[in-house]
Amino acid sequence: MKQVLVCITISAVLVSAGCSTGPRRGAPAPVVRSEAVPAAAATGAAQSAVAPESGVYPLQEPLEVEITPYVTGDSITPGVSPYPAAEPAAPVNSNNSAVVALLSNAGRQQQGGDIPGAAATLERALRIEPRNARLWHRLAALRLDQQQYRMAADLADKSNSLAPDDRELTRANWRLIARARSALGNSEGARQAWQKAQ
Amino acid sequence: MVRRSTGQTKGSTTRKNAASPARRSGGKRGGRAKRRGYRWSTRLLALTFLLSLISGIYLLYLDNLVRVKFDGKRWSVPARVYGRPLELYAGARIGPDQFMEELNRLGYRKVRHPQGQATWSRNNNRFIVRTRPFTFWDGSEPGHYLDLRFERERLAGLFDSGGAPLALVRLEAPEIGSIYPSHNEDRLLVSRKQLPDLLIKGLLAVEDRSFFNHHGVDPRAILRAVWANLRAGGLVQGGSTLTQQLIKNLYLTQERTLWRKLNEAAMALILDARYDKDAILEAYANEIYLGQDGSRAIHGFGLASRFYFNRPLVELDLPRLALLVGMIRGPSLYDPRRHPARAKKRRDQVLEMMRQQGAISDQQEQQAVKSPLGVDEPGSGGEVRYPAFLSLVRRQLHSDYREEDLTSEGLRIFTTLDPWVQEQSEKALSNRLTVLEKSHRLPAGRLQGAVVVAAAGSGEVLALVSGRDTELSGFNRALDAVRPIGSLIKPVVYLAALMQPRRYTLTTHIEDAPVNLKLAGGKQWKPENYDHRFHGTVTLFQALTHSYNLATVNLGLDIGLRSVTDLLVDLGITRKVEMVPALLLGALSLSPLEVTQLYQTLAAGGFHSPLRAIREVQSQDGGALQRYPLTVRQSVDQGPVYLVNRNLQEVVSTGTGRGLSAFVSADLRLAGKTGTTDELRDSWFAGFDTDRVAVVWVGRDDNSPAGLTGSQGAMRVWGDLMRRLKPDPLHLPAPVSVDNVWVDVGSGLLADESCANATLMPYLKGSAPVTESSCVTRPAQGIGDFFRGFFE
């Protein structure tokens, strides 16, 4: 009799224990990834590799771009960039009030430290005026600030391609490219770019 | 619960008594009986205690069950996918008709005087719109009062209610679909605050009158139901409270057993004791099943409102809310789209009950009864209308997210889809294919096709059409129809040649002469021109313009297959390319999407941007998770690309693409290339305007001959599409590395404007001809100039 009771008790406890769900520990598995430094950075390796088909650039925190900003060279003093520090980006002229509004937004965001927001705002402006060379330049300057040197140089190239006759702008772009190349350790390329900026 | 345990205890006691007589026979009567009585009462007590313990444990278990699910993530919330928001600003290229379509897509209602949110009115070219607020990943756009003036196909002015000009306003992003899990439950969560008062009143009137007074179970309602069912002689009324219904849906199976009923009641009591009524209401409103859309189950009032009325719950009026409440009893029985009469009867019944309970006035009821069901056309309520584009989104998301995150975390995915461009692409394809089948006497319904449109400068995919019947998600031709691209390869061959400016310019002569190659394996390859003729000595410019096969093969063999395959990689092709001579005529199979990538780099002047379908991903709570930023990479020098693009404009003005002038003005100077494969199996056209690159493929799924060349088939779809999109003229900025020079094309010599055959031709610096044609009349500039030019 007792054994039966014990059996019942134990099995009942076991059954209920088995059915119950253990308390959940911790938060649900997060999907959250931090606002990654935009893919652009796509690092040296990803740049030379072929972009994935229909691809989004890889999004894992790319960072740690191999940066050797100051190359020891004949004309370059270690620790000192041969090129003047960043300058204010060339002014954008647009007669589109929407673009003007977005630009001032982007400026505010940049000053407030919201770099991804500023980049997104500039991209929004570029959707409205995809051929505004000075907008491309602004985005290039922003990427340079973010130390995404390769992307900065490519964007400046793009800017140059759209306004070959805007001398002020092309000079600013070449200066930007010189800085980017210098930061990437390409001192010869930087020198050439700097010459084109003169 | 308690009663049940005692009942069981009694039962067991009786059984045990019955089992004892055998023992009773032995031993002394008095003391033993006493002791036995004592023993039995102890046992009874122990048993009662034990059973109470078991039921206690069981209750604890139920309590745990209820809490874990209710406190945790109750539902997996599918990711919602949005198209691009429409940007409104003075000067935007939006016509009034497009704008109206955009408003309808968002479920905005046309009224005489816009008062509430999501309403608009139109007076010729002037619109007044009250927009909905919307939370974008980068901040929220409040609801606006907008006064818009259109002039022809442009938004000429944008003002606020006070008449002050507004610089820029974003309409909300149109929802284009959701990514729901394999069990097919789709829902759109709403909070208690978003539940309209009348919805709650209706719910209580119909389903649970004393919801705010009972403790999870309503004995009076049960009695009432029993009485009603007895009277009617069948099941006409249920006595379940909202709490019980919620328990049933959330935790239990649908079987109808007493045990389940008891569990349901116990859990309802627990739920009611643990949580406040508002939390229970909110859960109920999100759980309830309200219809079916193919394999997708519509759950919750939030999604049902979108699904049936294409607008958020807060914007529903009384009759619509009453309809939703009425549908709870039988979503398919009272489906307002399939059984409108029955649904209306049920809705009116709900309205009557609401009036009886005092939830609405007589007048409100009378007015509501008179109004139509107000259900939106099927196909507008957040259903998957763009399955082809969504599958591209999914593929791109899968490289960054796990499937379960996409289907359960309530992500908001902002894509690049432009619903208007998408619609024009769909119409152009399906209309044009029908016309082609008639005009070419082809069997009806057999032609298929695909269209991809992307923003040239950024690689954003604006539209993707995978076949004639866009509602069907099936074979996605835009992504998966990998077909030989024929002459679409030719610009790559010419680009490879022009990248060697010392050897090739657009006016270099090449031979369009017979080719006879012995291939490895002893086979012969004897390609022919489309017109089966030889055109002799031609310039590169002419050969590409008219798509001469033999000239292209001779050119390609001269520069080497390697330079072509290398260039394909630079242009963004990742597929393995076989290095055979036939490659020069397009023996390379690509999907329409891959071809778009190839031409994107050309259209962007040599700047490669990976095609993207996604801009941002936002988490359920509104935080930005991820951006997919604009990237460019200069993969080919601008100079040679510019030369090829000028040549592609010529294709459209005088070459194989000249038939486009039947669709769009030649003044637009669009650039493009036709492609045709063996026995007319595939008909291709790829081209671009100033901001967009578009690719069309036409053929048959079984790969049998479609009977159309590139210019007879795909080009007409492309032309139809461009006519609808009303593009700006294509403006190609000449890179600094390019000079435009007058030449006599016949002789390939330097000319000037006065020469009869002179044409302005682009050359990479230093590659222009230096020998003057005899027609040049200007005074000689001296021998020095001549030599300077020569040595430059």
Image (spheres, coloured by chain):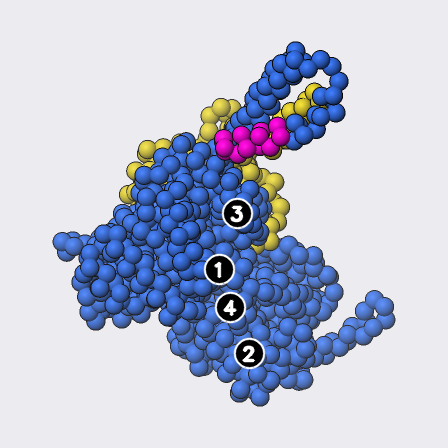
Chain colours: A yellow, B blue
Residue A99 screen position, x and y as percent: 30, 51
Front one among B585 and B753: B585
**Amino acid type at mark 3:** Thr
The answer to whether B59 appears left or right of B110 in the picture is right
Residue B176 screen position, x and y as percent: 44, 57
Please state which of the two labelled residues, at mark 4 or mark 2, is closer to the viewer.
4
10 Å crowding of disc 2: few (<14), some (14-19), many (20+): many
Callout count: 4
Indicate which disc residue B470 carries: 4
Q: Give the magenta part as a residue range.
A: B1-14
Indicate which disc residue B374 carries: none
Kindly identify which residue carries mark 1: B292
**Amino acid type at mark 1:** Gln
Kindly identify which residue carries mark 3: B407
Of the numbered discs 4 and 1, the one sitting upstream in the chain is: 1
The span from disc 3 to disc 2 (Cα, nearest Å) is 40 Å
Residue A136 screen position, x and y as percent: 40, 48
Of the numbered discs 4 and 3, the one sitting upstream in the chain is: 3
The span from disc 3 to disc 1 (Cα, nearest Å) is 18 Å
The answer to whether B427 appears left or right of B537 in the picture is left
User: Is residue B674 shown in magenta?
Assistant: no
Seen as rendered, the residue at the extreme left is B162
Label 4: chain?
B
10 Å crowding of disc 3: few (<14), some (14-19), many (20+): many
Dot 2 and dot 1 within a common chain: yes
The span from disc 4 to disc 1 (Cα, nearest Å) is 20 Å
Marks 4 and 3 close (CB-CB < 8 Å): no
